[in-house]
Image (spheres, rainbow, N blue to C red):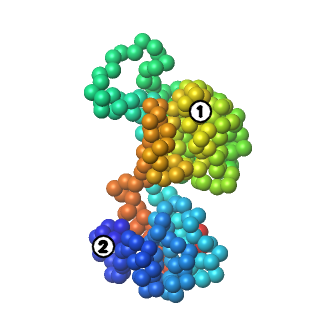
Amino acid sequence: MAERFALRGTSIRHVEVRTLEDFEAQIPQADVVLVSGLWRNTLLARAPRLKLIQSISAGVDQYDKDALKAAGVRLASAQGVNARAVAEHAIALVLAMARQIHLGRDNQHQRHWRGMIGDLAQREDELGGKTLVIVGLGRIGGRLAQLAKAFDMHVIGTRRDVSAGRGAADEVVPDSRLSEVLPRADFVALTCPLTPQTERLIDAKALGAMKRSAVLVNVARGRCVDEPALITALSGGVIAGAALDCTVEEPLPVDSPLWAMPNVLVTPHTAGETRRYEDNVLDLLQENLDRLWRGETTLKNQVV
């Protein structure tokens, strides 16, 4: 991030830290902090000059919002900076599972040339005419809907406020009606935020409502899925497969059954980690700095 920021040629002095110890040493001089996982709320007491925290990530659960507000420190999330990237990753996972790319890679490692398959149910599939249910039709989900329509999929989206429009989706239903559309899905993609309402949203009951041929794609948060229930469903043929960019515990423990399941594709929470990510975040940071310098009261993606 510091390297990309330096290339912009601003006159803003900046320093990069990689450890909590260095962060604690530097934060008393900081007016602005660009941070995500390294943040600790105890740092606030050591930051008398701090005016703005620009989160590197969309998630801001780690910040004590009340304490920041009391201290007069503004907080903005990075929501939306990786919407295109995560949507592209999601459609890549859908394609990979439909075309069995993960099994092809496994066969490559074993130097095994798979022959033609007579059983139609075991062959690769096409996306045209398949139904994709997108749980959370926000920025990422909306972009995913556009991509899915390019493959002639039927798209059903869920969102809290259906009046906000359906965009590229063919149908939009309120979150409360997810159970009604799950049986229609060939693919279920989670693009929702983690909230008390979405934690373990995909549980044994939800998995049981899906087709046995359906695939779950999770590019949201691991805790949106009841992981033990998912493992049971995958082992028992309740659903056909899962493509997971996030898991409950990260890194995924080496003893997790998910690693060895042939019907599971795991990527290490890299959906939004593209070559452009840092510059996308820095664009947002500079926009918010400009707003502060102009004396504006509202930041882009303002949280506090």
Q: Residue furthest front?
A: 255
258 or 28, nearer to the observer:
258
**How far apart are the alpha carbons under marks 2 and 1?**
49 Å
What residue would you read off at disc 2? 6
Label 2 vs 1, first from the N-terminus: 2
- Report the amino acid beneath label 1: Ala
Which label number is shown at residue 233?
1
Q: Secondary structure at mark 2?
A: helix
Q: Is residue 27 above or below residue 188?
A: below
Against 115, residue 198 (above or below) is below
Q: Position of residue 289 (x, y in %)?
A: 46, 76
Residue 95 at x, y = what percent? 43, 34
Instruction: Report x, y in % for residue 267.
Output: 42, 45
Residue at 52% in and 73% down: 40
Pick the front one: 94 or 121: 121
Q: Position of residue 116 (x, y in %)?
A: 36, 15
- Element assignment for label 1: helix
Identity, as a three-letter code, of the amino acid under mark 2? Ala
Mark 2 or 1: the one toward you: 1
Q: Residue at x 52, y 60 (%)?
A: 58
